[in-house]
Image (cartoon, grey):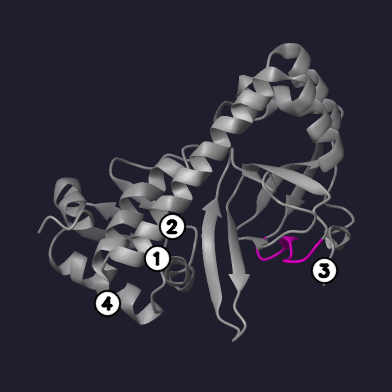
Amino acid sequence: MIEIKSLPTNCAVRPNEQICSNCGARALSVCGALGDADLARLDGLAERVSLPAGDALTREGDPARYLYNITSGSVRVFKLLADGRRQITGFLFAGDFLGLTAGEAFAFSAEAIEPVTLCRFKRAEYRSLVRESPSLEAALLDRANHELAAAHNQMVLLGRKTAQERIATFLLELPSKDPARPGGENTVRLPMSRSEIADYLGLTIETVSRVLTRLKTQGLLRLASLNEIVVLKPAALRRLAEGDV
């Protein structure tokens, strides 16, 4: 079992200037709901962390001593099944929190897909601040409701939609989850691999590749590169995602 201390010893380098006031992800996070006084207190609790691609933030079963606020990059959250298969339960981007709903131990693993920066908070200190800050408490409640709705949508995605509908839905929704790095018009940036998309959508990598090729052949999208897709016909892709074809 890998504990939080397995993070690189040189990863948590906090500059002298205030982290929160200079954070590009502040407007996308619960931190944006705080006034100057509460923000200064939050800044005092924050520890800046940088991770290279592939490094773990948490492992399933680790003690949940910390909370994380992602400020750049992307993270995959997953569970390993008993037979060794991986089920990715979500992708996190700048502004997203990790560990808000954890119990005494993390029920999932989380790894950096690409180089990631984040703020790390000791759980007990962060909870103390929440109790004393109504604005932060309200923002966290709103974020929790959002996560609950996302979990419900994911269950529908996996339980009711076809492979083509799942991929169409994924491509339409992904840009809104990573607003810190907007691409060109109707451009979908894919920091994750085809294998990770498959593990998130409950498909095989072969199915993901086959459906993307089919959508390209139908003129709905263009594969600009391995990590970028341009949606040529958003309305048609939306109808496909909703099963209205």
**The one of 166 and 54 positioned closer to us in this rendering:** 166
Amino acid type of the residue tagged 2 in the rendering: Leu
Q: CA distance from mark 2 to mark 4?
A: 17 Å
Q: Are marks 2 and 4 in contact (CB under 8 Å)?
A: no
**Is the residue 206 above or below the residue 239 in the image?**
below
Region of the chain picked out in magenta, as a range: 53-62
Q: Amino acid at mark 1?
A: Leu
Along the polypeptide, which appears first: circle 3 or circle 1? 3
Q: Earlier in the sequence, mark 2 or mark 3?
A: 3
- Neighbours of disc 2 within 10 Å: few (<14), some (14-19), many (20+): some
Q: Which mark is residue 226?
A: 1
Q: Amino acid at mark 3?
A: Ile
Q: Is residue 27 left or right of residue 54?
A: left
Q: Distance of mark 4 from mark 3, alpha carbons?
A: 37 Å
The disc placed on residue 82 is none
Is 188 placed above or below 80 here?
Answer: above
Q: Amino acid at mark 4?
A: Arg
Residue drawn where x is 62% and y is 32% of the image: 140
Q: Main secondary structure of the magenta part?
A: loop
> Which label is found at residue 2?
3
- Residue contact at pointers 1 and 2, CB within 8 angstroms: yes
Which residue corresponds to the image point at 90% horizontal and 56% vertical from the top-left? 9
Q: Secondary structure at mark 1?
A: loop
Neighbours of disc 4 within 10 Å: few (<14), some (14-19), many (20+): few
Distance, label 1 to label 2, CA atoms, is 8 Å
The residue that mark 4 highlights is: 210
Disc nearest the viewer among 1 and 4? 4
Q: Which residue is mark 2?
A: 190
